[in-house]
């Protein structure tokens, strides 16, 4: 079935946070298709942003000619306004994305997740006015990349898009606030907006602060793996190319004002994820240390994906296939992760894990399989 597309091809996209983990996958995938699409990335290059994530496209003259990189803050209206002026769609990946850091230092989460979103929306509103005045063909579409964490911890069943939002960490509260602002611009100003709520994403180029890349890179060095609490928290794992693909699908086909869950392919307890990655690496369970839990740790996330399926999207990568590709990528790209685990990494690691590891205990043998 041919589905109508909301964004012209080849089009011009403004991608925020395009040097991060999922944003860079989105950019690499679209430019790699060589269909003429032009992309401007705006990225502040925080500790999580990494120009090396775009090295493959920047080294390819045909793709590099269609990529413009602007190092700036999405909360800066002077930079954002002119960039939105030429965009068919604004895809907002930019955020502080790590729950543990939001517990240590929440403020940046609010600045980017709320004020930054507001600045982007205001720029889109100005362009919608220009479209109404006949000064451009159509208003830009705004795509907000959000998270399953806005639902809070889900004891049983699967969250649907109309469920009440109940975020429980500064990270997820900032993401929920950003979403609500986006929705308000749809209702109040008639802006063309869509929102995605993705589940736990993993894959190449993920910052090693997150569970899978942290444990893979630590295990490669035979260092301890700090498992929070009993390790029985459950997440639904989504391969990065599927997350980026779903965001693009919603950008092209989603109904204005609608929100779409993007579930993964495997709801698993953390212990089981760790067991599988150690198997792939050929490393022993004895590396795993049980450490003090994350405060307010959400026990489970799980979403219903019917609305996205009805829109025509299907994930392509199962968990074992994706995990094998991820583990192998980290093994083959040691220079990439060693560079990321430098500068202020040691200070962060000590702050987050120093006391935890000092009081840790051997994790009970894995019994989740
Ligand atoms: P990431 O931390 O790897 O990348 C975030 C990027 O945003 C970085 O390049 C950073 O430099 C940039 N950035 C941060 N603040 C900025 C600002 N003020 N202005 C401009 N750029 C800024 O994050 P990710 O894992 O790729 O996540 C991308 C988006 O997807 C986030 O909005 C996140 O909430 C959402 N999400 C992530 C997951 C996941 O499991 N990783 C799941 C669901 C949703
Ligand atoms: O669910 C979507 C969310 O997934 C995204 O919105 C976030 O941006 C992303 O960071 C991720 O959040 P989580 O907190 O679920 O991911 P993280 O990799 O930090 O942790 C995954 C699980 O592993 C969680 O239950 C906490 C646990 N964990 C994590 C780390 C870093 C540990 O046990 N030890 C650790 O050292």
Image (spheres, grey):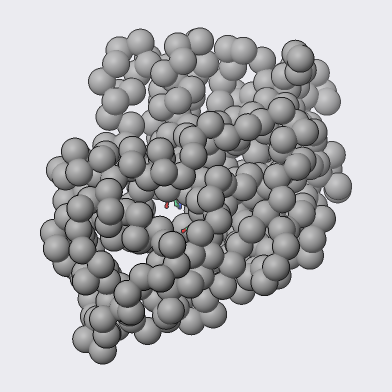
Residue 240 is situated, as x and y percent measured from the top left of the image, at 46, 40
Quadrant of the rendered image containing residue 335 = top left
Q: Residue 244: tell me if it is visible.
A: no
Tally of numbered tags: 0
Residue at the image position 61 percent from the left and 74 percent from the top? 168
Q: Is residue 367 left or right of residue 172?
A: left
Q: Is residue 43 above or below residue 276?
A: above
Residue 248 is situated, as x and y percent measured from the top left of the image, at 60, 30
Residue at the image position 20 percent from the left and 58 percent from the top? 283
Residue at the image position 29 percent from the left and 25 percent from the top? 56
Residue at the image position 84 percent from the left and 39 percent from the top? 190
Q: Is residue 126 above or below residue 74?
A: above
Q: Quarter of the image for the N terminus: give it.
A: top right
Residue 365 is situated, as x and y percent measured from the top left of the image, at 32, 74
Q: Is residue 203 above or below residue 41?
A: below
Q: Residue 320: tell me if it is visible.
A: yes
**Looking at this view, is 28 or 266 the one in front?**
266
Q: Is residue 288 left or right of residue 227?
A: left
Q: Quarter of the image for the C terminus: give it.
A: bottom left
**Looking at this view, is 368 or 56 the one in front?**
368
């Amino acid at each position: 079935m041919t589905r109508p597309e909301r964004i012209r091809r080849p089009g011009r996209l403004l991608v925020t946070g395009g040097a991060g983990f999922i944003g860079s996958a989105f950019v690499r995938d679209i430019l790699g298709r060589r269909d003429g699409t032009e992309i401007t990335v705006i990225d502040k290059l925080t500790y999580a942003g990494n120009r090396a994530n775009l090295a493959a496209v920047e080294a390819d003259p045909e793709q590099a000619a269609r990529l413009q990189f602007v190092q700036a803050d999405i909360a800066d209206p002077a930079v954002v306004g002119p960039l939105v002026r030429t965009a068919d769609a604004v895809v907002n990946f930019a955020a502080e994305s790590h729950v543990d850091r939001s517990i240590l230092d929440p403020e940046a989460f609010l600045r980017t997740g709320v004020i930054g979103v507001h600045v982007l929306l205001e720029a889109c509103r100005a362009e919608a006015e220009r479209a109404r005045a006949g000064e451009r063909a159509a208003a830009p579409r705004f795509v907000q990349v959000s998270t399953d964490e806005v639902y809070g911890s889900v004891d049983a069943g699967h969250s649907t898009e109309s469920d009440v939002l109940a975020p429980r960490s500064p990270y997820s509260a900032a993401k929920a606030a950003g979403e609500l602002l986006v929705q308000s611009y749809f209702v109040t100003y008639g802006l063309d907006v869509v929102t995605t709520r993705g589940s736990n994403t993993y894959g190449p180029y993920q910052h090693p602060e997150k569970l899978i890349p942290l444990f893979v890179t630590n295990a490669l060095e035979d260092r301890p793996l700090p498992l929070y609490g009993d390790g029985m928290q459950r997440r639904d794992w989504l391969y990065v190319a599927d997350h980026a693909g779903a965001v693009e699908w919603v950008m092209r086909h989603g109904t204005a004002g609608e929100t779409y869950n993007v579930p993964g392919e495997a709801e698993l307890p953390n212990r089981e994820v760790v067991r599988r990655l150690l198997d792939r690496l050929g490393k022993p369970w004895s590396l795993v240390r049980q450490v003090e839990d994350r405060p307010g740790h959400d026990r489970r996330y799980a979403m219903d994906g019917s609305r996205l399926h009805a829109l025509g999207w299907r994930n392509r990568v199962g968990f074992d296939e994706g995990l094998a590709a991820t583990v192998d990528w980290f093994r083959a790209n040691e220079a990439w992760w060693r560079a990321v685990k430098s500068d202020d990494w040691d200070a962060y690691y000590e702050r987050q894990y120093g006391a935890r590891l000092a009081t840790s205990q051997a994790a009970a043998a894995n019994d989740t399989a």
